Image (tube, rainbow, N blue to C red):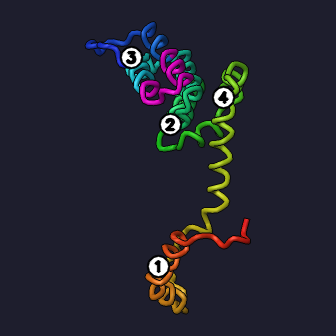
Amino acid sequence: MIPATLEIHSTERRPEECHILANMAEAFAKLGDVEESRKAFAEAVRLADLDDTNTVFVLANQAAEIGAKGDAIELLARFVTMVDRIERESKSAIDVLRAASAKARESYSQSYVPVLRQVVAEAELASATWERLRPLHQDNGEQPEDTEHLKVFEQTRLYRGAANVAVMNSEPPENVV
C-alpha cells in the first residue's frame, strides 16, 4: 500500500495537495484501511488553508465520508463561524451549528453531502438527548439517607462474580434453545 502521509517537509500551505490527500483519505476509507485514511486526512488538514471557506467545507465533507464525525462537526462549525464572521469563543461545535445564521445554513445545506447531513443530525440528536438527561446526571451534593443497598451490593460483589464465572463455564441445559 502507498503510505498516506507523503514525505512533505515544508510547512507551507498547499491547497492542491490538501485536496489530493483528502481524496486519498476517502479512497483508503472505502478500501477499509481506516488507519491510512486517518493519516491522509490529518495530513490534508495540516496542509489546508483553514482560512478558506471552500477548503474548510470540503474537509468537513471528507471527514464525514471517512467516518471522522467529530472532525466533520468541528470543521463545519469552523465554516459557519467564517461565513457568519463570528468568534467561536467557548461554544461547542454543535452550539455553533444551532446558532448558524440563515445565510450560513443556506450556504452549506444546498451543497452538503448526505453523509455530512447524517453526521450533523446524529450530533444534534445526541446533544439534545444529553440536555434532556443532564438533570438526572448532575450531582446536587446530597447523599441518600439509606445507603444499606450500597453496602449489600459491595458485600455480594465476590459472590456475583463467582456466579457469573460459574454460569459462563457451565453447559446450557438441553431443553433450552
Which residue carries the number 4 mark?
A: 115
- Cα gap from disc 1 to disc 3, whole angstroms: 55 Å
Q: Residue at x 56, y 32 (%)?
A: 67
Q: CA distance from mark 2 to mark 3?
A: 22 Å
- The residue positioned farthest toward the top in the image shown: 16
Q: Nearer the viewer, residue 36 or 81?
A: 36
Give the class, few, some or many, for how many residues have Cα within 10 Å of label 4's Cα (few <14, many ≥20).
some
Q: Give, as a three-letter code, the residue at label 3.
A: Leu
Indicate whether 139 appears above or below 50: below
> Under tag 3, what secondary structure?
helix
Instruction: Choose mark 4 or mark 2, whichever is in front.
Output: 4
Q: Nearer the viewer, mark 2 or mark 1?
A: 1
Which residue lies under the disc numbered 2? 88
Q: CA distance from mark 4 to mark 3?
A: 24 Å
* First along the sequence among labels 4 and 1: 4
Question: Disc 4 marks which amino acid?
Answer: Val
Secondary structure state at the residue bearing disc 1: helix
Q: Is residue 28 found inside the magenta-colored segment of the image?
A: yes
- The dot on residue 162 is 1
Q: Are marks 1 and 3 in contact (CB under 8 Å)?
A: no
Q: Which residues are magenta?
A: 23-38
Residue at (58% x, 70% y) in the render? 171
- Tell me the CA gap for discs 4 and 2: 24 Å
Q: Within the image, what quadrant is residue 39 found in?
A: top left
User: In terms of secondary structure, where does tag 4 sit?
Assistant: helix
Is disc 2 placed on a helix, strand or loop?
Answer: loop
Q: Give the prevailing secondary structure in the magenta stretch.
A: helix
- Answer with mark 1 or mark 3, whichever residue precedes in sequence: 3
Q: Quadrant of the C terminus?
A: bottom right
Q: Residue at x 57, y 21 (%)?
A: 57
Q: Position of residue 90 (x, y in %)?
A: 47, 44
